[in-house]
Image (cartoon, rainbow, N blue to C red):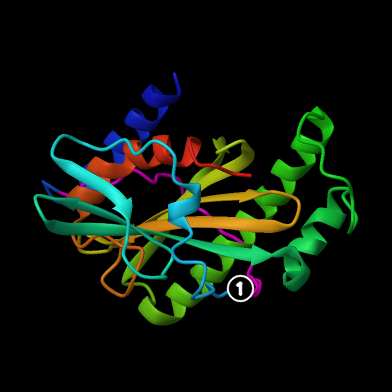
Amino acid sequence: MLRLYHLLLGSILLVSIPVGAKFFLPQFSAPKVVKSPAVAKLPNPNEGNIWQKILGNTAAPTNWQVASCKGNAPLLCVSSKGELLGTVEINVYPLANNEDFQKELVAVGIPPGSQVDYQNSKYQTQILSALKAWVADHYAAFAKERQGEYGKEITFLTYPPQPVPVGKLQGIRYGFAGLKQKGGVQEQHIGHVAFDGNKLYVITTAFDPGSQTGKFDKLENLAIFQPYLYAIAADLRLP
């Protein structure tokens, strides 16, 4: 039923997008503007790429390969026949350095230092509420930034946050896109966010000419990889 709902909404949007372009983040949003999240923890050169530790099964389209990128940058490389198609980035935000998310947790009834209880349905509901609030703040920050950058030339759209497993953690899948007024997709982003009691994990990729990492150069490749990314996120070794 959910897939049918997305297909129906997507078909409505296709009339405003050129043939060949793909878009899968329907629904307008008018978010409240707030400041961006705290700075992520920088990778320790001695730890290597975090994907090497958390990557589970790597589902991929035929003749595509998915593996941790070389080096210490927190990137997952997606390639085909030796050609890099795109990367997926993960950032880790320690709760101690993230005052904004601390406030979100307090707002849903989880004060600092609370015991993690993944088996408690009330706790799971509280975490999901806090993560949804984080996504709303994230959308707001991007909407403000894009409005200043693009003005009325780009329409900012958001995907309704969806509860999903991220490894063994309760997580939220989210996304947003910018559609050109004259037709076409300027940018499109997919994200997953989860919390383990101490750290916030944010996994992102995009079609965005302005991004340096965590991106695909071609929108169609991002669209093809999308369901495989969902499967990879669900099978991560988290916590």
The front one of 18 and 127 is 127
Residue 56 colored magenta? no
Label 1, secondary structure: give it.
loop
Please state if 100 lies on the left or on the right of 194 as rendered.
right
Q: Residue at x 36, y 63 (%)?
A: 214
For label 1, the residue is: 36
Question: For the residue marked with disc 1, what is the amino acid?
Answer: Ser
Percent across and percent down for residue 194 are 62, 48
Quadrant location, the N terminus? top left
The front one of 181 and 165 is 165
Percent across and percent down for residue 85 are 19, 57
Tell me the magenta residue range.
21-40
Residue 33 colored magenta? yes
How many numbered discs?
1
Above or below 168: residue 110: below
Residue 168 in sight: yes
Percent across and percent down for residue 17 are 20, 50
Please state if 123 lies on the left or on the right of 9 as rendered.
right
